[in-house]
Image: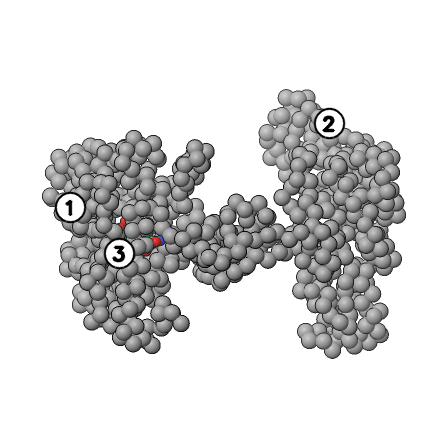
Amino acid sequence: MTIANIPVEDMTEEQAREELARLAREIAEHDRLYHAEDRPAISDAEYDTLRRRNLAVEQAFPHLIREDSPSRRVGAPVSEKFEKVRHKVPMLSLDNAFSDEDVIEFVARIRRYLKLAPDAPIDMTAEPKIDGLSLSLRYEAGRLVSAATRGDGQVGENVTANARAVADIPNVLAGAPPEIIEVRGEVYMTHRDFLALNARQEAEGKQTYVNPRNTAAGSLRQLDPAMTAARPLKFFAYAWGEVSEMPAQTQMGMVEALKSYGFRTNELMRHCETARELLAHYKAIEEQRATLSYDIDGVVYKVDDLALQQRLGFVSRSPRWAIAHKFPAEKASTILRGIDIQVGRTGALTPVARLEPVTVGGVVVTNATLHNAEEIERLGIKIGDTVTVQRAGDVIPQILGYVPERRPKDAQEFTFPTVCPCELKTPVVREGTAGGGEGVVRRCSGEFACPFQRIEHLRHFVSRRAFEIEGLGEKQIEFFFHDPDLPVKSPADIFTLARRDGENLKKLKDKDGWGDVSAANLFAAIEARRTIPLDRMIYGLGIRHVGDRTAMTLARAYGSWQDFHDAALAVAAGDSAAREEMDALEDIGDAVIDAVANYFAEAHNRGLVEKLAAQVNVEDAERPVMDSPVAGKTIVFTGALERMSRDEAKDMAERLGAKVAGSVSKKTDLVVAGPGAGSKLKKAAELGVEVIDEDAWFARVGGQD
Ligand SMILES: NC(=O)c1ccc[n+]([C@@H]2O[C@H](COP(=O)([O-])OP(=O)(O)OC[C@H]3O[C@@H](n4cnc5c(N)ncnc54)[C@H](O)[C@@H]3O)[C@@H](O)[C@H]2O)c1
Ligand SMILES: [Zn+2]
């Protein structure tokens, strides 16, 4: 066990001393990378974890607190590149809250300190914590005279010329500002500007930034102000330093004053009186977070009354009257333990990163998709690397990159397998692209003989738009697939289940999770699907590129299972007449035809299909009525239809041999308009297309349907 893993309560004094030294060293190094170089090596959450551990050790061993303790310092020493500015009023940090309890305790502490009753309301403010870098702007007689970064809190970097280049920062104040005022706030960059800038940097072969915060910091801290001017930086004002004559007596009032001087202030700032109100506003801001155009990393709560702020004062590096309630991290770093290959229903091999579990945005993440071999190459990751993981909304976690400094000597390069991980060890093939080149998708050529594809195929077979057997979902399919007594290895096996179980269905009823009722219900549901519409049958086969719409088109065109099956076999055998016939169908092209041909060219698949067809009765599809009054016409439905739903209308028209389009064009033959029809009606009039109402539609096709 290394020192970093020893719980604080088990530490000896010697270990505590050693651990405090390690933390001071590490935190100082991360501060330097983050503040002075604008290129952090770890996530903010990990950094916060280091700080919290430091605090915990210090609380347990207060006599060991170091002279250079991180809990006494702010930021990092200024860079030699810049002239130094000593702040008249120090620029401090903020204490952090990570949970609701922390916030409740923050409010309780203030009450205790001010000797207020435990339930006394306190005027407070809650506002977003902008993830940028803080800047202090000194105005004398309304004119900007100097601008400084926070630096180590006492001494900052002189970036006056750069600040003048930021459009949001007025050179001359509006309204009636005090003679001297230092306006403080956050310099940041919007998401859109960040992405555009990074794209430009990349195009020019220059260094790209990892996030908007570092970009903003790197952009402001340029030696050449022209460089800063070329970067779209923004500024929110929320605090102040030296002020010759206070324009207000509250936090809220001060922010309003700053606004009146021409600064942008944050609209999400609210007045609150209790911990509960603070937490409610935190939730509200958190919910809006994803829709904001800029990054925030928490909500800052402050005591509103400036006289009370004064009484509360400071503790070493932060005020007692404010706290930053941080959001759970949405990015974190962890170790890439391995890369697994997953095989999908269609045999596509997808590399998946196996990760040391890590919490990202409040959710434990253990793996992340890597999409394909090219993505692994692009990221440059090796097994053993420390990688950065991101979760955005409910999107699958993604790997953003790795930390070169943390690459172990024995990190292993990943080589993409050339055979499927299934026991068949069938070769992996690369699918061609539409453009004729090699695609990024690699597939197992084993098709349904490949056990991976088999189970995925079965899942597809019972899915909603295919056979949709009630009580036979993914979980049950998985169960039967592995069950030794009643195995289901192919679709046909589903329909022999009851027979194989014998008359009283004893085998299934005796199994865990099944009872008399559920077993009987399942067999009834399977029986009910023994008769199946042709389009569901075709879709259920899981032929690549044949979705439910395509399956419907094929079903309507061929009409019966026999005719479809014959055509598919003929296409697979290279019969050009059969191919042409299929090619003539609406919306069916080479991709679908090739997929049908490949599918039926594979002996495994032919066997599987025959076995299935022997078990089920496939209903003929209703063929389009080719002599209907609308056969061959292109129809647009618009407005509110009252006698049929939009889907029913489409279905009906198609059964009558018409084509249904979504917009009116020169090719449109007929528009059926209900009440409320708008632009499509206008377009039809312009183009001279015939327009009828719903009743006229039924009159025209009446008797046909
Ligand atoms: N990843 C790393 O290696 C690394 C290293 C150092 C710091 N950090 C990040 O910086 C934080 C510590 O930095 P810190 O000492 O500046 O503390 P802090 O960022 O937690 O809080 C203080 C800062 O918040 C900013 N802020 C934004 N909106 C504000 C508002 N509305 N009102 C008041 N202040 C507002 C100000 O710039 C202020 O200086 C860490 O928690 C971490 O997120 C990361
Ligand atoms: Zn395989």
Disc 1 versus disc 3: distance between alpha carbons? 20 Å
Residue found 26% across the figure and 52% down from its top: 75
Indicate if the residue with disc 3 has its beta carbon within 8 Å of ligand 1. yes
Residue 318 placed where, x, y %? 22, 57
Residue found 38% across the figure and 59% down from its top: 46
Q: Residues within 10 Å of mark 3 (few under 14, many from 20)?
A: some
Q: Earlier in the sequence, mark 2 or mark 3?
A: 3
Q: Earlier in the sequence, mark 1 or mark 3?
A: 1
Q: Which residue is mark 3?
A: 94
Q: Earlier in the sequence, mark 1 or mark 2?
A: 1
Q: The C terminus appears in which quarter of the rendering? A: top right
Q: Where is residue 529, by image quadrant? A: bottom right
Given the image, on which type of amino acid does mark 2 rest? Asp
Given the image, on which type of amino acid does mark 1 rest? Arg
Judged from this view, the residue extending furthest toward the front is 409
Q: Where is residue 695, by image quadrant? A: top right
Q: Which residue is mark 1?
A: 86
Check if mark 2's residue and mark 3's residue have beta carbons within 8 Å. Answer: no
Give the vertical position of 203 relative to 555 (above or below).
above
Disc 1 versus disc 2: distance between alpha carbons? 78 Å
Q: Which residue is mark 2?
A: 669
